[in-house]
Structure formats: structure tokens, C-alpha cells
Amino acid sequence: MRRDDAKLVYVVDTKPEVARALAEPLGAKQADAETALRDANVDAVLIATSTGSHADLSIAAAKAGKAIFCEKPVDLTLPKVEACIKAVRKARVPMFVGFNRRFDPCFREVKRRLDAGAVGKLEQVIITNRDPGLPELRFLASSGGLFLDFTIHDFDMARWLLGEEPVEVFARGAVLVDPRVKSAANDIDTAMVLLRTRSGRMASIMNSRRAVYGYDQRIEVFGDKGMLRAENLTPTTVERFGGEASCHDNPWPNFQTRYAAAYAAELTSFIASVERGKPAAVPPEDSRRVLLLCEAAAKSARTGQPVRMK
């Protein structure tokens, strides 16, 4: 993706040779974080490192007076997220958290029509999120678990679509895809979650680490005047019809292809907010609220009881 509204100045990585290989073809330089943050010509920082470093790098960027784009989640722990929010507020710099699915063109159109009253009074939100296959076990062991690594996207989408904060979370989890998920990562690979708001609106979330047909990403919103639905995207819209059956392409095979447009759109939103001095579309406070839902879901799945949100 090439842009004319921003210029890449530095690439920072724990492996300098990797950073250099990316930076040089783009006319940028390889550097360490301290050098990049000291440069007065740097207006903004994009943080796409491993999750454990997100908060510390965001705090350092805030102290340096830089606008911040940080991949989700800001951190896996509430104290670290709150420390980051405090630093950002003190520095008075914008911070955008990369919950990219809000920027998917199809999902945004569902939200636009929902807000315009297309289905009347909203009653239910149904979110399906299934990976095409299990990630490496060593990743799962450090990911924070299914709810914090995976369902976190769906909690953000649920809040965004419901228009109200959930007050109750009920979750069930299981290991149905691969028993090593439990033995090697002490995690689950399958979950269903029910959220309820104070007004009675509900959202259901369906997760699995395996969908043999591709990357399954669907949402549905239901109200007293109808329903809106965004189906899976496929590489082509070609269908074949025969005497025995009809068929079409399976969904895109991974998140990089499925959400390519969403990644571009969220970056456009971030750059525009920095240029115009406007608040970020997804502030770090949203990451805090979503983290609370993740923790509540983990507790509910562990205890078998619904968890009330404070």
C-alpha cells in the first residue's frame, strides 16, 4: 500500500537486518527505538511488535510527544493498559488502537445502516469468527489465551454494534480442535459467548480455531423491523451450477487477505486524525473496556457462571 499523505522515516525491529531489509526499499532507515523517538521530524509511531511490548513502547512514544498507532491489545493486563492511558492523557497525544474490523467496508456499511434505522430497534447481534487452522502451539502459549488473543476482536465489534456496554458475560469454552492446546498452552480452542446490555440487547459470539473451508467471518444484526447481514468474502463471485449441486469459492484463507481493505482504512483514519488534530477513532479507553470483557469471559468459562460487569 503506497500513500502520499505520510512518509516512512524509520523501521525498528529487534533484528536490525530484518528492519533494514524492509526500510531500504521504501526509502527509510533502520534504527533503534530511542533514535526514532528522538527525531523531531517523526510525527507518529506505528507499533506492531509482540503484544508484551505494546504498552511500554506506547508510553515511550507518548513521552516523546508522538501520535501513536498501536496494534491490539495495548496489553494483556489491566494495570499496564491503565498506565498507558495515563501516560497518553498526560502527554496529550492521540492514540489509536488497531481494532481493524471496525474498518472493514462491509461491516462499516452494516453499522451505517443500523444507525440509520434500517432494522428498527436493535435486539440481537450475532458474530461468527473462526480461524482456518490452529496457530503454532508456541504462539498460543504466549498469546494470552483464546479470549484475549482471538475473541477480543469480537468483543470490540459487539460493543461497537450494540451501542451499549454489556453488563453481563456468559462464556463456555472447550478443547475440540486439538488436545495439545490444553496440554501445551493451557488454553481452549472453541468458545461461545453471550453478552447482555442493561436494556436487554444481546450479542452472541461463536469462535473456533479451525474452519476447514477458510477464514469464517460473518456478522448479523437483528431488530424489530428486519435484519442486516454481512457474509464471508470470497476470492471471486463465480458460481458453478450442475445437475448434482451448485458451488462457489470458499472464503479467503487468512486474515491478511480478508482484512486487507480494513488495514488500509484504519491507517487512513489514524493519519487523518493526526493531520486534523482530531481524537482517534479507536482510543485506548476502548482497549481497556474490551480487556475487561475478555477477563469476564475467561472467569465465566472457568466457573461456569455468568459474570456481572462493574
Image: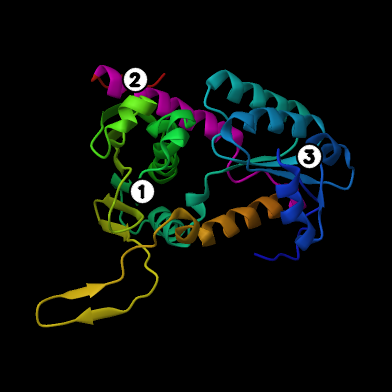
Disc 3 designates what residue? Answer: 66
Res 256 label: none
- Circles 1 and 3, Cβ within 8 Å, touching? The answer is no
Residue 283 or 71: which is nearer the viewer?
71
Circle 1: residue type: Asp
Res 299 label: 2
Distance CA(mark 2)–CA(mark 1): 23 Å
Disc 1 designates what residue? Answer: 131
Q: Tag 3's secondary structure?
A: loop
Q: Quarter holding the C terminus? A: top left
Residue 249 or 180: which is nearer the viewer?
180
Q: Let me know if residue 290 appears in the view.
A: yes
The x, y position of residue 134, in whole percent, is 36, 43
Circle 2: residue type: Lys
Q: Is residue 70 left or right of residue 236?
A: right
Tell me the residue at 76%/58% (across/down). 6
The x, y position of residue 118, in whole percent, is 34, 59
Highlighted range, magenta: 274-303
- Circles 2 and 1, Cβ within 8 Å, touching? The answer is no
The x, y position of residue 228, in whole percent, is 31, 58
Distance CA(mark 2)–CA(mark 3): 36 Å
First in sequence: mark 2 vs mark 3: 3
